[in-house]
């Protein structure tokens, strides 16, 4: 299974892209500022999504998220 990360996945293009990737058998990490919307998306297919509340305007958080995620997938 391949992995993907979608920033801003709670609505619009990001949300739709995440759905397309899941339909193509990807495990998708979705991020966004509204945690409750991320949880709603994950509830549709819990095994296909991982969620992370994240504001892309905070560069430090993005850097930490990136390294945390890369290290996690090295272990898989």
Image (spheres, helix red, strand yellow):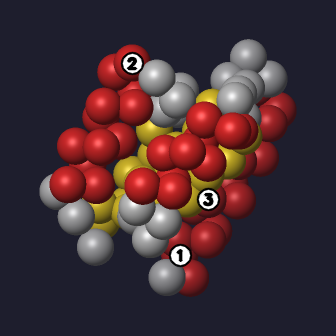
Q: Position of residue 63 (x, y in %)?
A: 72, 40
Alpha carbon distance from label 2 to label 1: 30 Å
- Against 31, residue 2 (above or below) is below
How crowded is the residue under tag 2: few (<14 C-alpha within 10 Å), some, or many (20+)? few
Of callouts 2 and 1, which one flags the residue occurring earlier in the amino acid sequence?
A: 2
Quadrant in the picture for the N terminus: bottom left
Say which residue appears at 26% left-offset and 49% top-offset. 21
Of callouts 1 and 3, which one flags the residue occurring earlier in the amino acid sequence?
A: 3
Residue 66 appears anywhere in the view: no
Instruction: In the rendered structure, find residue 74 and report the number of the disc placed on it.
Output: 1
How crowded is the residue under tag 3: few (<14 C-alpha within 10 Å), some, or many (20+)? few
Say which residue appears at 71% left-offset and 38% top-offset. 35
Using the rendered view, name the quadrant where residue 50 is placed: bottom right
Residue 24 appears anywhere in the view: yes
Alpha carbon distance from label 1 to label 3: 9 Å
- Name, please, the residue furthest toward the left: 24
Q: Position of residue 9 (x, y in %)?
A: 49, 32
Classify residue 37 as left or right of residue 42.
right
Q: Position of residue 57 (x, y in %)?
A: 73, 17
Q: What kind of element bears circle 2?
A: helix
Q: Circle 2 sits on which residue?
A: 12
Q: Circle 3 sits on which residue?
A: 69
Q: What kind of element bears circle 3?
A: helix
- Front residue of 2 and 39: 39
- Against 45, residue 41 (above or below) is above
Alpha carbon distance from label 2 to label 3: 24 Å
């Amino acid at each position: 299974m391949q992995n993907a990360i979608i920033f801003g996945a709670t609505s619009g293009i990001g949300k739709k892209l995440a759905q397309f990737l899941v339909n193509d058998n990807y495990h998708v990490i979705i991020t966004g500022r509204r945690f409750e919307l991320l949880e709603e998306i994950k509830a549709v297919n819990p095994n296909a999504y991982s969620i992370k509340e994240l504001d892309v305007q905070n560069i430090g958080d993005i850097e930490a998220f990136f390294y945390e995620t890369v290290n996690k997938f090295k272990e898989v």
